Each structure stands twice: as structure tokens, then as C-alpha cells.
Amino acid sequence: MTPDVSVWQYLTSFIDTLGGLQALVLIACVVGVITGGVLWAVGASGSNASIASKGRWAVIGAFGNAAVAAVLSALIAAVILSLS
């Protein structure tokens, strides 16, 4: 029994699209870190704990999303490899 490899041509275009989306997500994470850092700094310097807390969580969330986005392509490749 031979595997059906005709699906691979569609998967390669999907992987290429995923790489472009990953780049957009990482750019959004950089913007999130900058915005969160500014909010954190403004809140801390102005003694506004609510804004500082939101900025801190924005920075933490942006770094977490960047880590997930960086690992996601390797995880998808591993799943495709294990299923084929």
C-alpha cells in the first residue's frame, strides 16, 4: 500500500501561508510589548496601579504569544510528520 502524496502540494502552500502569518503575529507581539511597556511605565510613574498592572499583563501576554507563535510551526511540522 502506497501513501497518497497528492495532498503534500496543498500542505506546502499551507506551510508557506503559516510562515507569513507567523511573521505577522510576531510583529503584533513586538507592538504589544512596546505598548504594554509604555502603559506600564506611565502607570508606574503616575502612581496609577491599574494602568501599570494592565501594561504589565500586556507585556507578559505579548511575550507568551511570541513564544507560542515561534513553537507552533515546529509543532505543526511534527504533527504532519507523525501522521504521514
Image (cartoon, grey):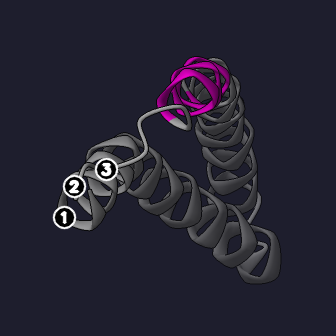
Q: Secondary structure at mark 2?
A: helix
* Rendered image quadrant of residue 9: top right
The C terminus, quarter of image: bottom left
- Relative vertical location of residue 13 with respect to residue 78 in this rendering, above or below: above
Q: Residue at x 53, y 31 (%)?
A: 6
Q: Mark 3, residues whose alpha carbon is within 10 Å: few (<14), some, or many (≥20)?
A: few
Residue 33 screen position, x and y as percent: 59, 40
Query: Pointer 2 and pointer 3: residues touching (CB < 8 Å)?
Result: no
| Nearer to us in this view, 75 or 82 | 82
Q: Is residue 40 magenta?
A: no
Looking at numbered disc 2 in the image, what kind of residue is underneath it? Ala
| Nearer to us in this view, 29 or 80 | 80
Residue 11 screen position, x and y as percent: 55, 33
Residue 10 screen position, x and y as percent: 64, 29
Q: Secondary structure at mark 1?
A: helix
Q: Mark 2, residues whose alpha carbon is within 10 Å: few (<14), some, or many (≥20)?
A: few
Magenta highlight: main SS: helix
Q: Which residue is mark 2?
A: 78
* Rendered image quadrant of residue 31: top right
Q: Which residue is mark 1?
A: 82
